[in-house]
Image (cartoon, rainbow, N blue to C red):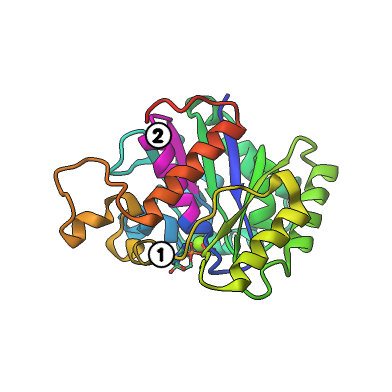
Amino acid sequence: MGKIISIVNQKGGVGKTTTAINLSTALALLDYNILVIDCDPQANATSGFGLNPKEFEKNNLYSLLVGESTFEESIQQTNIPNLQIIPSHIDLAGFEIEIINEMSREAIMKEQIAGLADKYDFIFMDCSPSLGLLVINALVASDSALVPVQCEYFALEGLAKLVDTIKLVQKKVNPALQIEGIVPVMYDGRTNLSQEVVKELKTAFDQLAYTTIIPRNIRLADAPSFGMPVFFVDRKYGGNGNSDLIFENAGAIAYLNLAKEFLLRNDKKILKE
Ligand code: ADP
Ligand code: MG
C-alpha cells in the first residue's frame, strides 16, 4: 500500500506547492512511483509541471470527486517518468459549498481516491492555503501531513492552529493520521532570524523537525515560470543540457536531500545514488 501525504499549511506562499513539486520529482527520479494530487483550485502544482489546467476541463480532481471522470481519465502523465498528476481546476473552488449539506462531507476525497494507494509508492496532495473543508478532506484521506514552514517572521504563528486541526481530524475521523514532519523552507543562512526559526522548530517539534533545510534559492523561485521542477531548470540557463539529472543548483540538491531524509524516515531504501 502506498502512503498518502498531505502537504499543508494554512498560510499562502510558504512553499507547499514548491515542496509538492520538487519532493515528488526527487522521489520519482529515485525510482519511486509517485502521484501528485493538486488539491488547490489555483492549480499551481499542475502548471508547475508544465500542464495547462485549461486543457483538463473534464478530467481533473473536481470531476473525479463529483464522479464525472474516472481515475484513468483524471490521471495525467507528467514529463517525468514514474510521476503522474491529477490536475486541479478552478471548478474545485466551488466544491466546499456544493458539499456542505452532504453526509460525511469530510470523507468524499477519501472515498473517491480509495483504490489509488495500491498503485503508487507515495501520493502527495498539494493543499490550498486554508483549513477549510477541502483541506480537511485531504487530511481525512491521508496517512500523514507534511508541513513546510518559512524561516521568517511569524513562522510559528498559525502552527498551533494547524496542529489542533490535525488532532481534531485524528480524534473525529482519521485516528491513523500522523505528522510526517515539519520542513524549514526559504532559509537564508545570512540572517540570524532564519537560524532562530530552525532552532525554534527543533525545540517545538523535536524529532518531527526535518534535518534537511530548504534554502531560499533563485532557481526554486524561477522554476514555476518554466513549468518544470527545479531539477531541470539549469538547462534553461545553458547548463549541461545533455544530462538527464542536473543536481547542480542548491535548490535541487536540497530537495534531493529532503527526498532521501523522507525515505529514511519511512524505512525505504534509496534505490539510486
Ligand atoms: P504555497 O504553495 O505555500 O502557496 P509556493 O510553493 O507556491 O507556496 O511558494 C510561494 C512562492 O515562493 C513561489 O513563487 C515560489 O516559487 C517561491 N518559493 C518557494 N520556495 C522557495 C525557495 N526555497 N526559494 C525561493 N523561492 C521559493
Ligand atoms: Mg500552493
Residue topped by disc 1:
217
Q: What residue type is labelled 1?
A: Asn
| Image position of 270 (left or right of 224) | right
Q: What element carries label 1?
A: loop
Find residue 98 and report its image quarter.
bottom right
Quick one: 193 or 242, which is closer to the camera? 193
Q: What residue type is labelled 2?
A: Glu
| Residue at the (49%, 53%) spot, across then down | 19
Find residue 117 and report its image quarter.
top right
Residue 175 visible in the picture? yes
The answer to whether 74 is drawn above or below residue 193 in the figure is above
| Residue at the (34%, 54%) spot, across then down | 230
The answer to whether 30 is drawn above or below residue 204 in the figure is above
| Image position of 10 (left or right of 26) | right
Q: Position of residue 243 (x, y in %)?
A: 19, 42
Residue topped by disc 2:
72
| Image position of 166 (left or right of 95) | right
Q: Which of marks 1 and 2 is nearer the N terminus?
A: 2
Asked if ligand 1 lies within 8 A of label 1, the reply is yes
| Image position of 5 (left or right of 259) | right
Q: What's drawn in magenta, residue-wise?
A: 19-37
